[in-house]
Structure formats: structure tokens, C-alpha cells
Image (cartoon, rainbow, N blue to C red):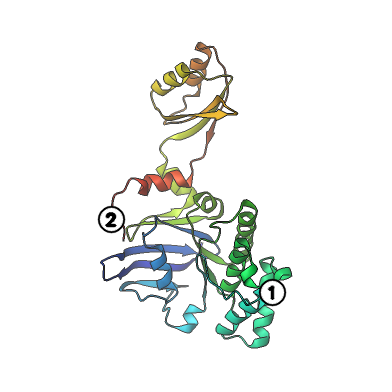
């Protein structure tokens, strides 16, 4: 897949010696690219540099094969942005808000109004176009933020925590919207702490820590590469402390956890570096139980993320 944005050796230092030292990222066209890191790792600094809100101290950003200069209005027009918890004038209606940003993008009054109406339809807010933004719910604000980022039809948009604080229904609406944007050829850089949502939506990810990129690549490839043990979920007719104890002693098994089902321990999860389901079934039978099922499950992005950064004690910028 063709590359749209390439970032190499991006640097920014603050007076307190914090900042970023080596951000590298390759974003492919027509993908949703996850941008992950602990609080203070440098995500916001990186996004602000891309948008021209901060000046970089080193490194290079390329867009569509050419050097990208965020100070250049034409270059910056290629990228839209919706920040985390944006503050919009509460007295403006949804249509007025998006139209104002259209005017700031250089559209005429009539062009701005038409763009606002079209984009509000896209994000399913057209019926609320005359409602004051101050009355919008958190989910509506997330969607109007996406509409604002799409003003001027940029090839790429950057979304910072678009599903943070949303209920499941609103989260699903935003997820479906981003999927539609991808199908329409848009490229999305998505920064989020909701790793389950990132795993559901993103094809590629970049993980940064302490101001540097520590991992990048295809979501599925990275999870498979760094997940040495297979996760299993096993269900039994009953579970006793003896069964759990004996399973823990099986060679190759680790991280055994009992799951209570309606107050009764009926399931457990464990990780193993080989297929040991037959051994587990024999332990159950020996102790007067029966293994009803034992299903291997895919590894999660959260497990990969914690494996990479969870135990690091580097001082964060």
C-alpha cells in the first residue's frame, strides 16, 4: 500500500529537557493508523508539530513523497485535525460552527454553508444542525469535530481521542463513521487510549515511549510476532482449587486466572507455549470434573502494549 506520510527522526525539546527525540512513523494511504503511547510519551507534541502548532527541532516530515512544511498553507490544507475535548463557542449552531471553519479554510460563504451541510449529513448530525453546540452531547461533539477536520476535503485527518468518554452506542457510531471514511479513501491517524477500539479499527500502529518510537507495523503482524504464548479460555463442569493448582503446574502454562460465572467458578484463562488442552482435560477428569470447552483466543493489543511499555521505568518527557 502506498505511503502517504513519512516521519523520520522528529525532535522537539522543551526548556525542562522534556519533549520528543526520535519519532518515526509511516502512514499508508487509505488506512486508519493507530498512534499509541502512555501519557507524556510525546503523542500530543508530535501531532502539534504536524499541524504547525509547534516547531520541530529536527527530523523530517514527508507527505505524498514530498517534504511537508506545516507553515505552508497549501501543505497544511492536506491535513485536518480534531483535538481531544475541543472547545467550541457554545453559542454557535452546528452548521454555523462548521461553516466558520470552512471560511477559515478559505471557502466562500456559500461554499462554507454547503460544506457544513454536507459534512453534518455525513456525520449524522444534519437534524441537529440548528442546535447550539453548547447543547451537544459528548458523542455529538466528537462527530462535529470529525466534520470540522474534513473541511476542505483533506487527504488525511488526525483525531485525538475521538471516542474518549463516549457510551457504547456513540462509540459504535464513531467507529462506523471512521470505517466509512477509510472506504472513501481517507487516511486517518488515530490517537487513543482505548486499545480495544484501536484494535478493532486500525490496520497499522505506531507505539511510542519516552519521546521515541519503539514499535511500528501491521496490527496483526505485531501482535503475532510479540505474543509468544497462546491464550486459552477453558470452561469446566466445575472447578476446584485442586484443579487450578494442578493446571498451574503443567509445563508451559502460565498466568492462570479463574473467572467467576454468576458467583460460581466455571471458567479459567491461561497462557501456554504449546497445545496442552489434552493435559488440562485429563486433570479435570481425574478430579471429578469435565472440560466442556477450551478455546484458543487471539492476543490483544492491550497485552502487546503492556508488554512493550508497561514495565518500562524510563523517565517520560
Query: What quarter of the picture does the C terminus occupy?
Result: bottom left
As drawn, 172 above or below 280: below
Element at label 1: helix
**Front disc: 2 or 1:** 2
Return the disc, 2 or 1, that comes first in the chain's sequence.
1
Q: Dot 2: within a 10 Å radius of its alpha carbon, few (fewer than 14), some, or many (20 or more) residues? A: few
Q: Residue at x 52, y 53 (%)?
A: 198
List the residue tagged with mark 1: 118
Camera-side residue of 263 and 171: 263
Relative to 130, 137 lies left or right: left
Q: Residue at x 55, y 15 (%)?
A: 289
Camera-side residue of 224 and 316: 316
List the residue tagged with mark 2: 315
As drawn, 47 above or below 285: below
- Find residue 155 and name its label: none
Q: Quadrant of residue 165?
A: bottom right
* Mark 2 → mark 1, Cα distance in angstroms: 46 Å
Residue 308: image x %, image y %?
Answer: 37, 48
Residue 121: image x %, image y %?
Answer: 70, 70
Relative to 175, 58 lies left or right: left
**Are the residues tagged 2 and 1 within 8 Å (C-beta)?**
no
Q: Dot 1: within a 10 Å radius of its alpha carbon, few (fewer than 14), some, or many (20 or more) residues? A: some
Q: Quadrant of residue 96?
A: bottom right
Amino acid at each position: 500500500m502506498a505511503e502517504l506520510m513519512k516521519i523520520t527522526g522528529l525532535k522537539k525539546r522543551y526548556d525542562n529537557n522534556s519533549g520528543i527525540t526520535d519519532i518515526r512513523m509511516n502512514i499508508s494511504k487509505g488506512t486508519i493508523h493507530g498512534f499509541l503511547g502512555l501519557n507524556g510519551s510525546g503523542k500530543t507534541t508530535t501531532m502539534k508539530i504536524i499541524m504547525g502548532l509547534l516547531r520541530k527541532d529536527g527530523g523530517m516530515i514527508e507527505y505524498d513523497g514530498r517534504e511537508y512544511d506545516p507553515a505552508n498553507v497549501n501543505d497544511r490544507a492536506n491535513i485536518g485535525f480534531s483535538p481531544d475535548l475541543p472547545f467550541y463557542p457554545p453559542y454557535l449552531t452546528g452548521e454555523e460552527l462548521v461553516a466558520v471553519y470552512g471560511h477559515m479554510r478559505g471557502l466562500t460563504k456559500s461554499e462554507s454553508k454547503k460544506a457544513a451541510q454536507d459534512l453534518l449529513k455525513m456525520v449524522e448530525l444534519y437534524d441537529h444542525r440548528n442546535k447550539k453546540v453548547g447543547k451537544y452531547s459528548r458523542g455529538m461533539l466528537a462527530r462535529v469535530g470529525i466534520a470540522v477536520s474534513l473541511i476542505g476535503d483533506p487527504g488525511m485527518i488526525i483525531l485525538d481521542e475521538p471516542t474518549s468518554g463516549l457510551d457504547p452506542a456513540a462509540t459504535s457510531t464513531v467507529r462506523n463513521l471512521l470505517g466509512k471514511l477509510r472506504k472513501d479513501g481517507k487516511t486517518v491517524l488515530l490517537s487513543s487510549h482505548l486499545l480495544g477500539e484501536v484494535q478493532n479499527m486500525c490496520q497499522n500502529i505506531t507505539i511510542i515511549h519516552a519521546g521515541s518510537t519503539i514499535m511500528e507495523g501491521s496490527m496483526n503482524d505485531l501482535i503475532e510476532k510479540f505474543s509468544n504464548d497462546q491464550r486459552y479460555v477453558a470452561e469446566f463442569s466445575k472447578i476446584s482449587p485442586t484443579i487450578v493448582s494442578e493446571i498451574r503446574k503443567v509445563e508451559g502454562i502460565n498466568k492462570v486466572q479463574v473467572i467467576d460465572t454468576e458467583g460460581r467458578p466455571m471458567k479459567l484463562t491461561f497462557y501456554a507455549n504449546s497445545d496442552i488442552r489434552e493435559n488440562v482435560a485429563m486433570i479435570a477428569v481425574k478430579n471429578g470434573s469435565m472440560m466442556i470447552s477450551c478455546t484458543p483466543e487471539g492476543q490483544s493489543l492491550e497485552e502487546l502494549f503492556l508488554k512493550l511499555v508497561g514495565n518500562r521505568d524510563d523517565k517520560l518527557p
